[in-house]
Amino acid sequence: MAGFLDRAKEQAQNALSQGKQKVDEVQQQRAGNDLLKQLGAAYYAERRGTGSAQATQDALTALEAHISTHGDAFLRGAHPGA
């Protein structure tokens, strides 16, 4: 009986670990998407004359830092209409 409980506990811990990893991946993807959206908004504002080159550069720098830390998988994710 103890062997069964040990295996069940191990499986539960593995499932919990996998779930936490998936949550972390989703959070990183959302953060990357938000940074990409901010870059697009900054660029659009700059092109319309209501934003600045510095704001665009700051958004790009933040996006590049995120990619450096977490990778660019979010750029290859499913996009609406793609």
Image: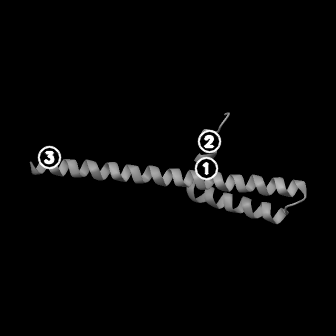
Query: In this view, which residue lies farthest toward the left?
Result: 1
Q: Which residue is mark 3?
A: 4
Residue 76 vertical position relative to residue 5 in the rendered view, above or below: above
- The residue at the point 38 percent across, 49 percent down is 18
- The residue at the point 16 percent across, 50 percent down is 5
Query: Is disc 1 in contact with disc 2, using a CB cutoff of under 8 Å?
Result: yes
- The circle drawn on residue 76 is 2
Answer with mark 3 or mark 2, whichever residue precedes in sequence.
Answer: 3
**Distance of label 1 from label 2 (alpha carbons):** 7 Å
Answer with mark 1 or mark 3, whichever residue precedes in sequence.
Answer: 3
- The residue at the point 72 percent across, 56 percent down is 38
Q: Which residue is mark 1?
A: 72
Query: In this view, which residue lies farthest toward the right?
Result: 49
- The residue at the point 26 percent across, 47 percent down is 11
Q: Quadrant of residue 77?
A: top right
SS assignment at label 3 = helix
Graded by Cα atoms within 10 Å as few (under 14), some (14 to 19) or many (20 or more), the crowding at tag 2 reads few
Of the residues tagged 3 and 2, which is closer to the observer? 3
For badge 3, the amino acid type reads Phe
Query: Is disc 3 in contact with disc 2, using a CB cutoff of under 8 Å?
Result: no
